[in-house]
Amino acid sequence: MNTRTLRIRPARPADASGISEVHDAAWREAYRGIIPGRELERMMMRRGPLWWRRLLSSRARVIVLDFDDRVAGYVTYGPSRMRLLPYGGEIFELYLAPEFQGLGFGRRLFRAARHALAEEGYPATIVWALAPNERAVAFYEKLGGLAVVRRHERIDEVEIERIGFGWA
């Protein structure tokens, strides 16, 4: 009999390499053609296993999707960085390895992070997505997020619109 286990749990420092692998694969999938290639690779290089190990050894809030003892996805969250908006909590990142996308696991990670934020006293949540990342925009819209704010940022020589999706 073949049994597989799927768990959503708090990340541990031992998950650093797995999270780094998911980060790189998901970013290549999500941002190829949106963020200039050389800059995309530079951005990913800054977030290697050592960076993640340090983050996970701190008080960072990270939840992983653990599939058969392999990190298949992760979500990071905490108090909102945009204090002027009426959203006390923020989901900073939510990524799945490409082979785990489209199976409902992102929704489960999202709900786990929202639940954790609500338990910390942050029931209203904001998430940012790059507007050209149509898959992410559709994902957050399908989850009921409302586009509440738009900003532009320059990455390398490209100006990219970011959309803030809010949940009350």
Image (tube, rainbow, N blue to C red):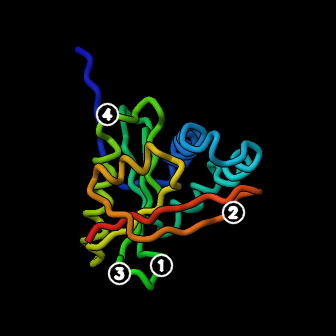
Asked if disc 1 and disc 4 are in contact, CB closer than 8 Å, the reply is no
Q: Nearer the viewer, residue 141 or 71?
A: 141
Most extreme residue toward the top is 1
Mark 2 or mark 4: which is in front? Answer: 2
Query: Disc 2 marks which residue?
Result: 154
Q: Where's residue 11, x and y in %?
A: 42, 53
The amino acid beneath tag 4 is Leu
The amino acid beneath tag 1 is Met
Q: Where's residue 38, x and y in %?
A: 77, 45
Query: Disc 3 marks which residue?
Result: 86
Mark 2 or mark 3: which is in front? Answer: 2
Q: Secondary structure at mark 2?
A: strand
Q: Which mark is residue 73?
A: none
Mark 1 or mark 2: which is in front? Answer: 2
Query: Disc 4 marks which residue?
Result: 103
State how far apart marks 1 and 3 are (Cα): 9 Å
Q: Where's residue 3, x and y in %?
A: 25, 23
Judge the density around disc 2: few (<14), some (14-19), many (≥20) Cα neighbours within 10 Å. few
Judge the density around disc 3: few (<14), some (14-19), many (≥20) Cα neighbours within 10 Å. some
Q: Where's residue 56, x and y in %?
A: 51, 60
Q: Secondary structure at mark 1?
A: loop
State how far apart marks 2 and 4 are (Cα): 32 Å
Which quarter of the figure has residue 87? bottom left
The amino acid beneath tag 2 is Arg
Which quarter of the figure is the N terminus placed in?
top left
- Is residue 44 positioned above or below 113 on the image? above
Which mark sits nearer the N-terminus, 1 or 4? 1
Q: Is residue 27 left or right of residue 36?
A: left
Q: Residue at x 31, y 69 (%)?
A: 117
Query: Disc 1 marks which residue?
Result: 82
